Image (spheres, helix red, strand yellow):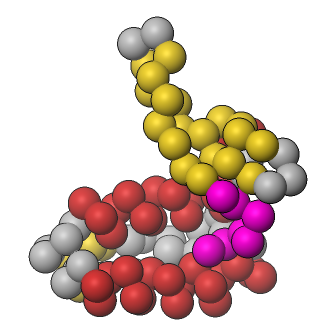
Amino acid sequence: ALDSNVTALEVVAISKRSQIYIGSRVSGMLPFTCYGDGVRRALLLAASVEAATDDILLIDDVESALHFAAMRRTFDWLREAARDRNVQVFA
C-alpha cells in the first residue's frame, strides 16, 4: 500500500454518476479527488493492471505524478500485481 492509513476503497453512485472514495484512519471517507495527483496515478495504474489481465500493459511516463518516496513501493507493487495477473508491462 502507498499509505498505511488507507482502510477502504469504494465506488459510490451519486445521481447517475459514480465517485471513488478512499477511506482513511486519519480523515475518514473522502472522494479520491481530494487526494493529490500521485494517488490518482496509483489508482489508474492499479485499474490498468487489472484490466490488462493475461495481456500487455504499455505505460508512458511511469514515474509521472508519483512522489519520489512512493516510487519504490509503487513499482514493487506494480511488478507483483503484473506477475499475479499475467501482465507484461512495458514502461
Q: Residue at x 34, y 62 (%)?
A: 48
Residue 78, percent across and down? 44, 81
Query: Chief secondary structure of the magenta span?
Result: loop
| Residue furthest out toward the left | 54
Count of labels shown? Answer: 0
Indicate the quadrant where residue 79 lies: bottom left
Q: Is residue 33 visible?
A: no
Q: Residue at x 62, y 74 (%)?
A: 1
Residue 24 visible within the image: yes
Q: Is residue 20 magenta?
A: no
Image location of residue 40, percent across then percent down: 59, 53
With respect to residue 55, does 19 lie above or below? above
Image: 44 above or below 64: above
Viewer-closest of 45 and 12: 12
Q: Position of residue 19 (x, y in %)?
A: 52, 31
Q: Read off the magenta span.
A: 1-7
In the rendered image, which quarter contains the C terminus?
A: bottom left
Q: Nearer the viewer, residue 7 or 36?
A: 7
Q: Residue at x 68, y 48 (%)?
A: 23
Is 25 on the left-hand or right-hand side of 29? right
**Residue 21 on image: x %, y %:** 60, 40
Q: Is residue 5 magenta?
A: yes
Please indicate whether residue 74 sits to the left or right of residue 24 in the image: left
Query: Which residue is painted at 50% across and 74% down in the image?
Result: 62
Looking at the image, residue 4 sits to the left or right of residue 82; the answer is right
Residue found at the far right of this picture: 26
The image quadrant that residue 70 belongs to is: bottom right
**Residue 70 position (above or below residue 25):** below
Side of 59 where 12 appears, left or right = right
Q: Nearer the viewer, residue 61 or 40?
A: 40
